[in-house]
Image (cartoon, rainbow, N blue to C red):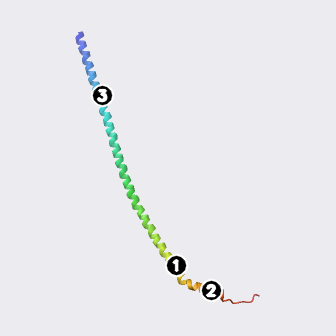
């Protein structure tokens, strides 16, 4: 009977060792899988970030270009107005100078009462 009990105990110990090995392998697999999942998630996040960054750069380029075009149009319009004012000044310049000179040199004395 004791030999039979000893054999049963030995069988239980062997089964326990085998179960321990299986649990250890499962832990190792789980740890490995968690690391792989973390690495995959990091890659996905980086790809998503790069995609959004590219979208932002494209959006910024489109809208900045529109602002530059508006600024250039405003500058062209301002330059045209400045030229127009300068030309008007040149056209009337001679008359203004003559009027000023006439006012200074054509003195009409009047008695003061």
Residue identified by numbered label 3: 24
Residue 40, above or below 107: above
Mark 2 secondary-structure assignment: helix
For marks 3 and 1, the one nearer the N-term is 3
Q: Say which of marks 3 and 1 sits in front.
A: 1
Mark 2 → mark 3, Cα distance in angstroms: 110 Å
Left or right: 71 as drawn, with respect to 9? right
Residue identified by numbered label 2: 101
Q: Quadrant of the C terminus?
A: bottom right
Residue found at x 31% / y 35%: 32
Q: Residues within 10 Å of mark 3 (few under 14, many from 20)?
A: few
Q: Residues within 10 Å of mark 1 (few under 14, many from 20)?
A: few
Residue 83, above or below 6: below
For marks 1 and 2, the one nearer the N-term is 1
Residue identified by numbered label 1: 86
Image spot of residue 31 (x, y percent) = 32, 34
Determine whether label 2 and label 3 are within 8 Å by CB: no
Residue 19 figure quarter: top left
Q: Nearer the viewer, residue 39 or 2?
A: 39
Left or right: 104 as drawn, with respect to 79? right
Q: Say which of marks 2 and 3 sits in front.
A: 2
Residue 13 figure quarter: top left
Q: Residue furthest right?
A: 113
Residue 37, above or below 89: above
Residue found at x 23% / y 14%: 7
């Amino acid at each position: 009977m004791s030999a039979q009990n000893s054999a049963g105990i030995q069988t239980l110990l062997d089964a326990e060792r085998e179960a321990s090995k299986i649990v250890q392998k499962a832990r190792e697999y789980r740890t490995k899988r968690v690391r792989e999942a973390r690495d995959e998630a990091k890659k996905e996040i980086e790809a998503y970030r790069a995609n959004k960054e590219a979208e932002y750069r494209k959006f910024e380029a489109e809208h900045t270009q529109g602002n530059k075009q508006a600024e250039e149009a405003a500058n062209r319009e301002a330059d045209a107005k400045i030229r127009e004012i300068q030309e008007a000044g040149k056209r009337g310049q001679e008359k203004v100078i003559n009027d000023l000179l006439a006012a200074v040199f054509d003195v009409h004395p009047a008695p003061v009462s």
